[in-house]
Image (cartoon, grey):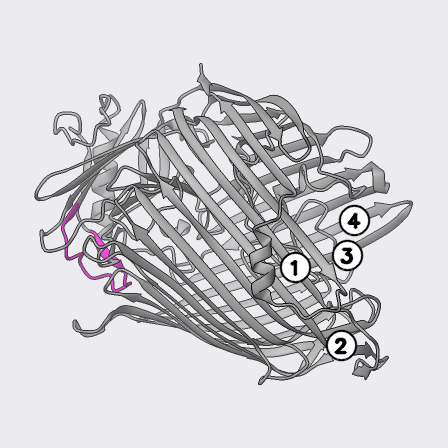
Amino acid sequence: MRAPLTLSILAALAVAPLAQAVEIDGRIDPAEWDGAQRITDFRLTQPLSRTPAPQPTEALVLATPQGLAIGFRNTQAQSIPRTRQFAQRDEGGPVDRVNLYVDFDGDGRNGYNFTVLLSNSINDTTIGNENQFNDDWDGDWRHATSEDETGWYVEMLIPWHIAPMRAASADGKRTLGLSLDRVIGATGERASWPAVSFNESRFLTALERIQVPAYSQSLLAITPYVSGIYDAVGRGSDFDGGVDLFWKPNGRFQLSATLNPDFGQVESDELTVNFSATETFFSDKRPFFTENQGFFDVPFGALNNNSRLIYTRRVGGRNDDGVGSGDVTAAVKVNGSAAGFNYGVFAATEADDIGRDFYAVRATRDFAAQGLGAMVTRVNRPFLDREATVYEFDHRWTPNSQWSIRSALVGSDVDQAGRSSRDSGAQLRMDYDMGKGWRQQLYALHLGRDLQLNDFGYLERNNFNYLRYDLGHRVTDLPADSAYAGKDFHYAVSRRYNDQGVHIADAFAINRRSDLRDGGNEFAEIAAWSSGHDDLITRGNGVVDVPSKLYLYYERFRPRQNGGRWAFYGEAQYAAEGLGGMDEGKSRLYFEPRYHVSDRLSFFSGMEVSHNPDWLLWRGGNLLGSFRSDMITLNAGSVWLIDDKQELRVRLEAIGLDAHSRQAYRVAADGRPLKVAESIPDFNLRNLGFQIRYRYELAPLSHLYIAYVRGGDLFEEGLNQEGSAGREFRDAFDLRDSEQLLVKLSYRFEI
């Protein structure tokens, strides 16, 4: 079925080079869509049964000089409620929606996801490494929806200038990778064409390949901004300005540049409590640093999806002298293609004598079943007399529809104060789809002891060797009266060593991810680690013998039902990872109800309560302390989407933590934690973040922001008084380290 359909798409699009413009109004006019290819073979991919979709869906694909036009006719029985909930950009939710996934080069390396909700709210993300989505990017594209008694309709227009693309083939055609899907919010069912899911190990390389006329558009966009901040605590004010520039003279070249990029508190980071040896990862919302960044996103050391060779938060991050943040003077990014290669160049510089310089160059070349890539990054840090260079080479091979093999080699070369340090790392990921819902994955990772990637990248740790085998099984043939629509099981075993041969732990894990027929989802996991060693907690002051660990986790999301008011999300966790063993673990509960006054206004209040009878912390040198701790966290607020142009958001976060010392330990030369009669002070912590933000959209990617921000944090140690997490939580609302009023105006001029 798939091959003839592909041929019909090629034929239809090849004879329509003079397609007329489509008016994006959500009403599919047959005359405007004349010559479009019609697609009706949508199959269920959530649950992933690949059976024909129960609700008819028809999609239209039409290449026009103005861009790639996509239309959807979504038939929906009156017995199935329609969810018209409005959402902030990139927030989405369990609502009726459609998705376009497109790889403009058709090589399976980078893609884009464009989502339109029934309410005409949108999401847009970049896709890399087969199925890793990043919603930091915002693009300029057109969309509209409408509905009647039988169903609802969507029109999209994706301009050709939205992404860099390779040169056209000799016959004037361009090969795209394409996928379309539709989600019914009330049931959670997703129907896709072709029948591939982003939850599978292969997604981008499994998209349908189609040919379209190689239209090209040029664009010059200039976005100046001005901002002003009044600090009520410091009794001062500050004004700033800058500009972002985007230039695409043709499909093969794209330049982004910024002068004095904005660092206003329009987007605030979530509050965190982190006493571990690894830093907290934060995403980046600055427009320049998200534009076409997917080409530079090379995952490496991927114990999770955060590890990467370029972590743009380093640019303008904390100064090397430890005082304040870097002042980014300018940055430039170039993406393009030539002679069969894709390439990218990135450069950024910070002001003053302590400012750093960041550089990156990347190139890729793709063939029928294989792809090669290489990247070099360099960071100059004059304050530290340090220069760090990283070299990377990656290879991917997809010999058939069952196998996907990806590998990468990395080396670092660091020169600091005349001393050189070099080391290397490697990773291998092999995925095999066995059919009938079964698949396997083998993942191997080596990180050398002196491998250093964090001058520009993000790596949780080095000095690490990791081997993991995962067996997955998908179940979709559940009875019609089951509360579950599909279940996805994973069984994994792993081994961890460092480069000195120290055994960190062996582990196993079993988890189940489920789709429910109420449109919600559920996840449960049990994992256990063998006894072993912790080589990070003392920050280089000894390796610690640690007992076995146990992890239990459960989460459940239940969306609004049949136009109701309430949605619920909850988590429960048990984590025993201290010296007390499996029966002295941390217990944590989180519950977040959300009340929808209407489809445009909602309130939420999430409360987390945790108790840890054996919290093991580093207290300097080879000294460790075990604490009994309690923590209360609040995450509450409201979202009011006043109309299609205006938004008012309120966000309140507060943390109260109280920790009482139980026992001090010194790490012996053989790794044993020895109890010692040393006094370790109790401590408590409180943290507050509050923001009221109004946003008005003047034009696409042009906004007026008015934000009131208040926050503070306080860490107290050795008060020698009985405290409580509840008291710290209440006192957090009195914090006022900063109180600011921010106004920012940005406007995008397109030439």
Check contact, mark 3 vs mark 4: CB within 8 A: no
Label whose residue precedes the other's in the sequence (4 or 1): 4
Which amino acid does the dot numbered 3 rest on? Asp
Image coords of residue 437 (percent x, y): 33, 70
Image coords of residue 482 (percent x, y): 21, 73
Identity of the residue drawn at 77% across and 62% down: 449
Up the image or down, 61 lies above or below 623; here it is above
Q: Secondary structure at mark 2?
A: strand
Mark pair 4, 2: CA separation: 30 Å
Please name whichever residue, 677 or 295, is drawn nearer the observer in this view of the structure: 677
Image coords of residue 80 (percent x, y): 14, 55
Q: Which mark is residue 19?
A: none
Specify the principal SS of the magenta part.
loop
Label whose residue precedes the other's in the sequence (4 or 2): 4
Identity of the residue drawn at 56% across and 36% down: 265
Up the image or down, 719 lies above or below 533; here it is above
Which amino acid does the dot numbered 1 rest on? Leu
Mark pair 3, 1: CA separation: 39 Å
Q: Report the span colored magenta.
A: 42-57
Which amino acid does the dot numbered 4 rest on? Asp
Label whose residue precedes the other's in the sequence (3 or 2): 3
Please name whichever residue, 356 or 162, is drawn nearer the observer in this view of the structure: 356
